[in-house]
Amino acid sequence: MTESLAGQTVEAARRALTARFKSNGIDSAELDARMLVGAVLGLDLTGMIAAARRLLTSDESIRLEDFARRRLAGEPVARILGLKEFWGLSLQLSAATLVPRPDTETVVELALEMLRAEPDPARRLRVVDIGTGSGAILLALLSELPDAEGIGTDISVAALQTASSNAAHLGFAPRATFVACNYAAALSGPFDLVVSNPPYIRSAEIAGLATEVRNHDPLQALDGGADGLDAYRVLIAQAARLLAQRGALVVEVGHGQSGDIERLMTAAGLKLQRPPKADLAGIRRAVAGRKMPP
């Protein structure tokens, strides 16, 4: 920071950070400043308003200046704080996990729709999240399906440690198991639901991603190969084998990829019962297929 925050009031420090972030082209400047100040002080918005005239301590100003430096260097607020909310759940992050994005909630929405279209109250639902990362999708589903049990897989042991910690913190540990393997290679079915947010960025496009993504999200969770479809070719075939009859596969896809994914699902014998589900930006973000009886 070019200006020390020491001795400033909470409100003055928040305004100073907002102005600095705006001048550096950060679109979410006001929100980011408020979140960082709140994290340093341990206060929510109401608490910050009440403490607006309080002076920052020396330790608080040093910590806040460090946070600001990191944000100005392109590090996402979620990485700085080590936490991100997804589906109303507070999730811990690590260097081995993606930052869960609101777009991915579309996968949760479509997965729930697919399950509710084929209810089976006599059976305990079994769910698997391939490439679970922080556990975001799996834990969101378990929060909505109190009788379900789930498995999260990931090739990264560090990511699985983060997901397991999140499951324990949120009270889902008794219903969540985590397995280290390549996609679903170590699993045997049947499962009622398979979900995944696999790497889908074309290799040549990685260098052009936003700094927040390119420099801070794990590469293996982003790089989908030359056409962005490498992961789908593996996991769709695996899911078709693992799904129970009338079970569903729901995956997140990148912009313009939904048609390719539908063709891969059809080729694997899955039936397309509904169109891809769009995210809030109108991008077809989630694609689903169902395994039908022969």
Image (cartoon, rainbow, N blue to C red):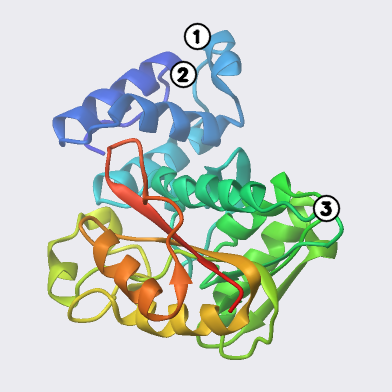
Foreground residue among 97 and 226:
226
Look at the numbered discs 3 and 2 and tell me whether their residues touch, using CB distance below 8 Å.
no
Quadrant showing the N terminus: top left
Q: Quadrant of residue 18?
A: top left
Q: Is residue 1 left or right of residue 133?
A: left
Residue 125 image position (x, y, % from top left): 76, 62
Residue 291 image position (x, y, % from top left): 55, 71
Q: Mark 2 = which residue? A: 10
The residue drawn where x is 28% and y is 37% is: 281
Sequence order check: which comes first, mark 1 or mark 3? 1
Q: What whole-number distance in Å separates the C-alpha atoms at marks 3 and 2?
A: 53 Å
Q: What whole-number distance in Å separates the C-alpha atoms at marks 2 and 1?
A: 6 Å
Q: Mark 3 = which residue? A: 121
Look at the numbered discs 2 and 1 and tell me whether their residues touch, using CB distance below 8 Å.
yes
Sequence order check: which comes first, mark 2 or mark 1? 2
Secondary structure beneath disc 2?
Answer: helix
Look at the numbered discs 1 and 3 and tell me whether their residues touch, using CB distance below 8 Å.
no
Secondary structure beneath disc 1?
Answer: loop
Classify mark 2: residues with Cα within 10 Å, few (<14), some (14-19) or many (20+). Answer: many
Amino acid type, callout 1? Arg
| Vertical arrangement, residue 116 with respect to residue 160, above or below | above
Q: Quadrant of residue 41?
A: top right
Sequence order check: which comes first, mark 3 or mark 2? 2
The residue drawn where x is 33% and y is 24% is: 30
The residue drawn where x is 68% and y is 87% is: 188
Q: Mark 1 = which residue? A: 53
